[in-house]
Amino acid sequence: MTAAIEICGIRKRFGTLEALAGVDLEIPKGEFFGLLGPNGAGKTTLINVLAGLVRADQGAVRIMGHDVVADYRAARRSLGVVPQELVFDPFFSVREALSIQSGYFGIRDNRAWIQEVMDHLDLSSKADVNMRALSGGMKRRVLVAQALVHKPPVIVLDEPTAGVDVELRQGLWQFIRQLNRDGHTIVLTTHYLEEAEALCQRIAMLKQGRIVALDSTPKLLKRVHHLFLKLRLVGELPEELRPLEHGSAAAAHVLRMKDYGEVEKALSCIRRSGCSIEEMELVQPDLEDVFVEVMHHA
Amino acid sequence: MSGFPTLLYKEVLRFWKVGAQTIGAPVLSAILFLLIFGHVMEGRVHVYDAVPYAAFLVPGLVMMSVLQNAFANSSSSLIQSKITGNIIFVLLPPLSYLEFFAAYVLAAVVRGMAVGMAVLLVALPFADLSIRQPLWIIAFAVAGSAVLGALGMVAGICADKIDEVAAFQNFIVMPLTFLSGVFYSIHSLPAFWQGLSRFNPVFYMIDGFRYGFFGVSDVDPFGSLAVVCVFLGLVSALTLGLLKRGYKLRH
C-alpha cells in the first residue's frame, strides 16, 4: 500500500547551516504522527519540503505516492498545511478567504463544505467579519479551515496550538481526531509534549536535521526506565536522599527512582530519619522525560 | 479545474476593495497634472500641428497612469504578501508558475485599464479630444500595462522590503514614464535627448497610444508596437525564469 508520506534521503542546506542532514521517514495512511524536536531542529524545514515551499538539495518526497516536485499538482492537492506563523490576508472576510482558497485548488462551489468546516471550528459567527478584526485564536482557526478546504487526505499542522487558549485547543483536537478517525493522515509538530503523547500513535524526534528517535508512543515512553517520587515532608529531606533529588515542585521534593525497590529504600530512610510524609505521589515518566533523555544522548 | 481564474479574481478584488487608494488617488494626481501643466504650458510648447497642448497632454497622462498603476498593482501585491507571509496561500495550492504569472499580469492590466478609463473620463471635459483609431489605443494600453505588470512582478519578487519596491518605482519607473514624452513631443527636444529617448521603451508605449487619438505620432505605430512586444517578451521571460526557479519565493 502506498504510504501517505514517503521521505527519502532529504538534505537541505541554507548557506553554512545544514537544516536537514539526510531524513528518511515513511508515514502510513491514517496515522496520527508527531514530529518533535527543539527549535531549529529542522521540523518546519521538513514540512516546507513536503509543501513545496522549500526545495530539497537531495532526496525525494512523495505525498500519497505523488512526487512533490515532478507531480506537484497531485501532491499539493493531497496535502493541507496549517502554517506556524499567524498569517492572513487583510483584504478579505473569513468566508471570502475560504472561498478563494478553495478556488486556488480548482473547486468552484465549495459552500457546503466551507460551512461545515466553519461550524466545526466555531467560525460561523465570524464568517463575514474581516480577517483583520479577528483575535489571534480566531485567525488560527481560519488557518486550520484554509488547510482543509480541499479535503486533503494528509494534513500537516505546524505548532497549531502555539499561543492558543485551552478551549480552542480542546475543540481543535476534537476536530482533528475526528478527521483522523475519518481516515485523514495527520502530522503534528508541537512544543506541548503532553499533546503529542495523548494524540500521536508514532513519534519522530529530530535534532540538528536528523531523526534521532522514531517509534510508537508507548515504546518511546518505555525508553525511560526511572520513575519519580514526589514527596511533601514534615521536616528536612534526609541527607542521603539529596543526590536523588531531581527537582522540586510547589514545596515538594521530586526524587528520581531507578525502580520500585529504590522507592522502598527511600521510604524506610525517611522513616529512620524521623520525619513524616505529608503527601506522596509516584509519577511515571512522560514524553517530556523521554524527549530530554533522547536529546541529551543523541 | 485550474486555480488561475480565482487567483486573477483575488488580485482584482484586492485593488477593487481599496478603490479610493488604487483608482481614486491616481485619477486625482493625473487631473492635477492636467490642470497645472495644461495651464502653464499651453501656447509655450509646440506639439503636433493643430493639436492644442491640453488635448496632447491627456492621452499621455492617461497612459502614464495606466503604466504606473499596472506596475504598482503587481509589485505591491507581491511585496505585501511576502512581508505579511500570506504569500503561502498561493504557494501551497497546485498553481503552475505560468498561471501565477498570467494572473498577476492580467490583474495589473485590469488595474491599469480601470485607472486609465477613469482618468480619461474625468479629463475629457478639460480637452477637446477625438479618438481616431481605438484599436491602437487598446493595443498599446494592454501591451504597455502587461510590460509594467510583469516588471512589477520582478520588483515584488526581488525586493525584501517595501522601500526596495518604492526605490524601483521612484528611480526606474517614474523617470522612464516622465521622460517618455508624456508632457512633450520628443521632436521638440535637442537631437541628443531625442536620440536618448528612443532607448526608453515607455516612449514607444506613450507615442503609439497617442497615435490612436490623433492619427499622428513621432514614430510609426507598427514600429512602436513591435518594440513594446519585444520588450514584453523580454520582461516576461525574465519574470517566468524567476518564478520557475522559485527565486525568493520557494527557498
Image (cartoon, rainbow, N blue to C red):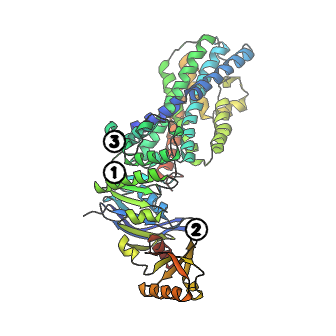
Q: Are marks 1 and 2 on the same chain?
A: yes
Residue A108 visible to an observer of this rendering: no
Q: In what quadrant of the picture does the N terminus of chain A appear? A: bottom left
Q: Position of residue B15 (x, y in %)?
A: 52, 32
In the picture of the structure, the residue carrying the numbered disc 3 is A116
Q: Is residue B180 above or below residue A119?
A: above
For residue B61, what is the image quadrant? top right
Q: In terms of secondary structure, where does tag 3 sit?
A: helix
Q: Amino acid at mark 2?
A: Thr
Q: Please tell me the numbered disc located at residue B216.
A: none
Q: How many residues crowd mark 2 within 10 Å: few (<14), some (14–19), many (20+)?
A: few
Which of B76/A33 is in front?
A33
The answer to whether the residue labelled 1 contacts the one labelled 3, judged by CB atoms less than 8 Å apart, is no
In the picture of the structure, the residue carrying the numbered disc 2 is A16
Q: Please tell me the numbered disc located at residue A152.
A: 1
Residue under the point 60% across and 81% down: A236
Horizontal side of residue B238 vs B125, given as left or right: left
The residues bearing labels 1 and 3 have C-alpha atoms spaced at a distance of 15 Å
Residue A38 visible to an observer of this rendering: yes
